[in-house]
Structure formats: C-alpha cells, structure tokens
Amino acid sequence: MVLDDIADLMEELCKRETRRKVAGHFTRDRKWAYNMALGCPFRLDTDFIAGLDYYGYELKLVKKEKN
C-alpha cells in the first residue's frame, strides 16, 4: 500500500536527517514530517512530488490488468 511505503520512507529519512531538513525539502514543517513517519495521510501536490524527486523517488499510476 502506498501509505505504508511512504511512512517507511519518511521514517528512514528522518533517521538520516533532522525532521526540519526533511520537511524543508517537501516545503512543510517538522510536525508534518513526524506525522508522515507515523503513517498519517498526506496531500499529494507538486511540493510532495518535488520532495520525493529530491530523494530519488517517484510515484507512478499503474493500471491493473483485468482478470
């Protein structure tokens, strides 16, 4: 699930860098980074996409195959 993967990523990033620094790359505040690491829902916007890109990640929308 996407939310679990993003929570794992944010938890990993917050271990390597300060929450303030991680949140800055997503143009958010420290509280946001803490909530993301806990798996709280997020708003998908261009700042979030740019932050993922900064860390070398991208989101893809993939159509499921019909069974």
Image (spheres, rainbow, N blue to C red):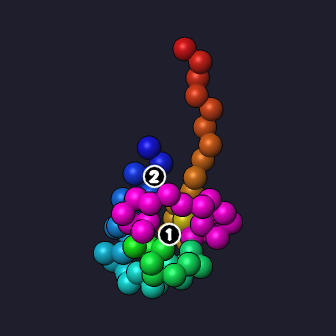
Give how far apart the Cα atoms at labels 1 and 2 are: 17 Å
In front: mark 1 or mark 2? 2
- The three-letter amino acid code for the residue at tag 1 is Tyr
Give the residue furthest to the left: 15
Label 2's element? helix
Q: Residue at x 44, y 65 (%)?
A: 36
| Amino acid type of the residue that numbered disc 2 sits on in the rendered structure | Leu
Residue 22 in view here = no
Q: Is residue 19 above or below residue 9?
A: below
Across and down, in percent, residue 42 comes to 54, 60
Residue appearing at x 40%, y 73% in the figure? 34
In the rendered view, would you say 50 is above or below 63? below
Find residue 3 and name its label.
2
Q: Nearer the viewer, residue 48 or 34?
A: 34
Marks 1 and 2, the one that precedes in the sequence: 2
Q: Position of residue 61 (x, y in %)?
A: 62, 43
Q: In the rendered structure, which segment of residues is drawn in magenta?
A: 35-51
User: As drawn, is 18 to the left or to the right of 59?
Assistant: left
Asked whether residue 11 is in view, the answer is yes
Question: Is residue 47 one of those drawn in magenta?
Answer: yes
Q: Is residue 49 magenta?
A: yes
The residue that appears at 48% across and 48% down in the rendered structure is 2
The image quarter containing residue 14 is bottom left
* Image spot of residue 1 (x, y percent): 44, 44
How packed mark 2 is, by other alpha carbons closer than 10 Å (few <14, some 14-19, many 20 or more), is some
Q: Secondary structure at mark 1?
A: loop
Quadrant location of the C terminus in the rendered image = top right
Crowd band around label 1 with a 10 angstrom C-alpha radius: few (<14), some (14–19), many (20+) = few
Residue under numbered circle 1:
55
